[in-house]
Image (cartoon, helix red, strand yellow):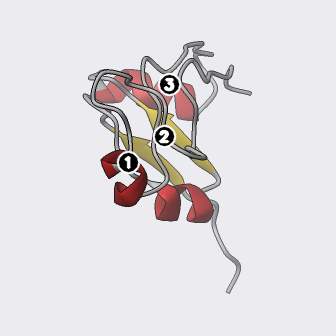
Amino acid sequence: MSSCPTIIDIYLDRPAVIPELDANAAAIIGNFSAYQRIVLEVIFGEFKPTGKLPFELPRSMEAVRNQLEDVPYDSKDPVYKFNHGLTYE
């Protein structure tokens, strides 16, 4: 049996701790409340989105606890940094 690449569509209304998802997915789509139809258009190549993260995705809850309260993107070694963004290919 062959393996099938996994695409994860995650609703990001705030930062999430997702290192296990990142390690096991071929792609992660942060949808920020997008319509399902639009997400499918992205997956099937009918639409090529661009975007940047408005926050970082920390590597662990320990990293979250060690952050300064008034600095939203200072965690150690985040999975994805603030302003990270790619185009879909």
**Residue shown at 67%/87% (left/top)?**
1
Left or right of 3? Residue 53 is left
Mark-to-mark CA distance, 1 and 2: 7 Å
Q: Is residue 51 left or right of residue 2?
A: left
Instruction: Give me the disc on residue 13.
Output: none
**Label 2 secondary element:** loop
Question: Closest to the observer: 30 or 34?
Answer: 30
Corner quadrant of residue 78? top right
Q: Which mark is drawn over residue 41?
A: 3
Tell me the distance, in whole angstroms, between the alpha carbons under discs 1 and 3: 39 Å
Task: List the residue tagged with mark 1.
Answer: 66
Of 59 and 23, nearer the camera is 59
Is 66 situated above or below 57?
Answer: below
Disc 2 to disc 3, C-alpha distance: 33 Å
Q: Earlier in the sequence, mark 1 or mark 2?
A: 1
Give me the disc on residue 75.
Answer: 2
Mark 3 is on which residue type? Answer: Glu
Within 10 Å of disc 1 (Cα), the crowding (few <14, some 14-19, many 20+) is few
The image quadrant that residue 22 belongs to is bottom right
Callout 1 touching callout 2 (CB < 8 Å) = yes
